[in-house]
Image: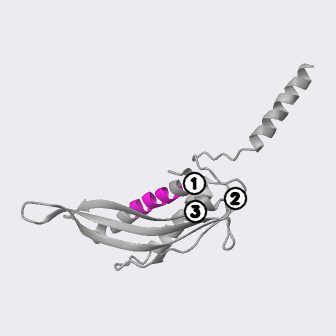
Amino acid sequence: MKYKSLMYCIFSIMIFTSCIRLTFSGASIPEGAKTFSVNYFVNNASLVNPSLSQLITDKLRERIQSQTSLIMVNDNADLTFEGEITNYIVQPAALQANDVASLNQLTITINVKYSNKIDEKQSFSQQFSRYQQFSSTVSFSSVESSLVEQIVNDLVDDIFNRAFINW
């Protein structure tokens, strides 16, 4: 009798857990979604960083692959991301008494379109913008790559959270 009860409990747990799609990132994947695609982000900013489009595209793909069970495909995906870089600008962030910048700021703005074939209500088009500040005593070219890396990571977090965590 104990053996049957134990087997029944184990079987019930297996059936129950197979109906739930969990991820360790807290991501909520639409039921039935199996594939995703991230189209190349076009750079339409007036100031162009030549590696930025590829970096955003690759980082978003990597994040989705590592944090979900979705399979990346090129066409006809259940979930599709596409977008454009609309702004890449360096500007003063804080002025000193003599009208000289003590801090500068790099801002990157992108437009993202997320299409969800499984649940159209979850689809969105949204602008995301992030920035990093740096001292005006250092040249932009010496800190650009690290600033871009930080900003892109923040943008990818924002996109992922909006699409999968509804944050």
* Cα–Cα gap, marks 3 and 2: 13 Å
Q: Residue at x 69, y 47 (%)?
A: 21
| Residue type, numbered disc 3 | Ser
Compared to residue 109, the image places residue 46 above or below, namely below
Please state the extent of the stretch shown in magenta in the rendering: 149-160
- Report the side of 85 relative to 123 (left or right): left
Mark 1 residue crowding within 10 angstroms, few (<14) / some (14–19) / many (20+): some
Question: Which residue is depicted at the point 82% across and 29% down?
Answer: 9
Can you give x and y, in whole percent of width and height, for residue 111 in the image? 46, 69
The residue nearer to you, when weighing 91 against 116, is 116
Disc 2, SS: loop
Q: Which mark is residue 33?
A: 2
- Residue bearing mark 1: 164
| Residue carrying label 3 | 123
Tell me the CA gap for discs 3 and 1: 11 Å
Nearer to us: label 3 or label 1: 3
On whether residue 153 falls in the magenta region, the answer is yes
